[in-house]
Image (tube, helix red, strand yellow):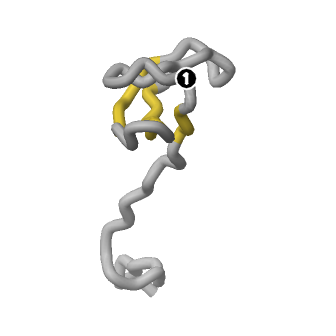
Amino acid sequence: MPLFTYKCEICEHEFEELVRSVDEKVDCPKCKSSLVKRKLPTIKVNGSSGAPKTSGFS
């Protein structure tokens, strides 16, 4: 089951929820509102440049 992060449009509470499918209905655990939006996942990239590191072999 994937873990998604949601944000409530009413109380702005952010929370994580394990869901069985992307179509599963999720309610805010704080205010019980069904007006929640799934947030896009964030990806952490190591290093400060986008250039690939070389091994030093020619």
Q: Residue furthest top?
A: 20
Q: Quadrant of residue 45?
A: bottom left
Q: Nearer the viewer, residue 50 or 35?
A: 35
Position of residue 10 in the picture relative to residue 55 (left or right) = right
Residue 51 x, y percent position in the rendering: 47, 83
x%, y% of residue 43?
43, 56
Instruction: Choose between 13 and 49: the one closer to the eye.
Output: 13
Instruction: Name the residue located 48 percent from the left edge and 20 percent from the top edge.
Output: 27
The x, y position of residue 20, in whole percent, is 56, 12
Q: Is residue 24 above or below residue 44?
A: above
Q: Quadrant of residue 17?
A: top left
Q: Is residue 18 visible?
A: yes
Residue beneath label 1, please? 34
Is 41 located above or below residue 3 in the figure?
below
**Residue at (43, 27) in percent of width and height:** 3
52 or 26: nearer the viewer? 26
Secondary structure of residue under mark 1: loop
**Residue 31's quadrant in the figure?**
top left
Q: Residue at x 53, y 48 (%)?
A: 40
